Image: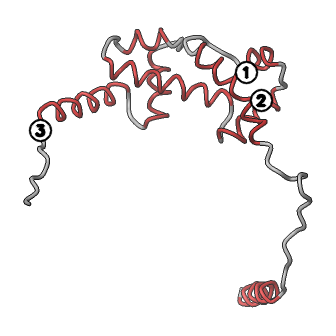
Amino acid sequence: MIYLELFLLDIIQSHSSVQTTPPVRHPGFFEDASPNRKKRLEPILQYMQFHICERLTLSTICEKFSLSRSSLQTLFHNEKGCGAMEYFSELKIQRAKDIIRDGNMNFTEIAYYLSYSSLPYFSRCFKKSTGMSPAKYASSVKGISQALKNAPARSAPVREA
């Protein structure tokens, strides 16, 4: 075991003493294509927002925008850090949080409105995304809004001349 440790230390020392030069970058070849990707992604994001209450599939989005599955996934991973359907699920959860804060629908209605297959599935997705159940989220939002209503108004500090 001691020999392995000595061997690893020797490798580390030999690599740290070697001077390395950074790789040569050819102008324009490795430049970030981010503006172009963002331009391609924007209509897809708008489409997802517009169809948030539907059960979109990866195939549907690919067909609509004439992209392969791998191109779509690569585009989302590069720009959003997640896959297209994961992003769409997060959009749905954000919308669910907005609806819960409004207090106009119960959880079953929200699940149906956002096209979840069942209330338990909606609850699992919500908890996976937020770390709490929809009921716990609703009670925490209600508690925060009550605390804000009951908080005394703060006056501006008085300045002496």
Q: Of discs 2 and 1, which sits in the foreground?
A: 2
Q: Are the two marked residues, 2 and 1, in contact with CB atoms closer than 8 angstroms? A: yes
**Which one is earlier in the sequence, the residue at label 1 or at label 3?**
1
Q: Of discs 3 and 2, which sits in the foreground?
A: 3
Depth order, front residue of 3/130:
130
* Left or right of residue 140: residue 131: right
Residue 34, percent across and down? 75, 42
Where, quadrant-wise, is the C terminus in this rendering? bottom left
Which element carries disc 1, helix, strand or loop?
A: helix
Q: Of discs 1 and 3, which sits in the foreground?
A: 3
Q: How is the image coloured?
A: secondary structure
**Quarter assignment of residue 83:** top right
In the drawing, what numbered circle is on residue 58?
Answer: 1
Q: Residues within 10 Å of mark 2 (few under 14, many from 20)?
A: many
In the drawing, what numbered circle is on residue 72?
Answer: 2
- Measure the C-alpha gap from mark 2 to mark 1: 8 Å
**Quarter assignment of residue 137:** top left
The kind of residue on which mark 2 rests is Leu
Which element carries disc 3, helix, strand or loop?
A: loop
Residue 144, percent across and down? 23, 34
Where is mark 3, residue-wise? 153
**Which one is earlier in the sequence, the residue at label 2 or at label 1?**
1
Q: Outermost residue, front direction?
A: 161
- Measure the C-alpha gap from mark 3 to mark 2: 50 Å
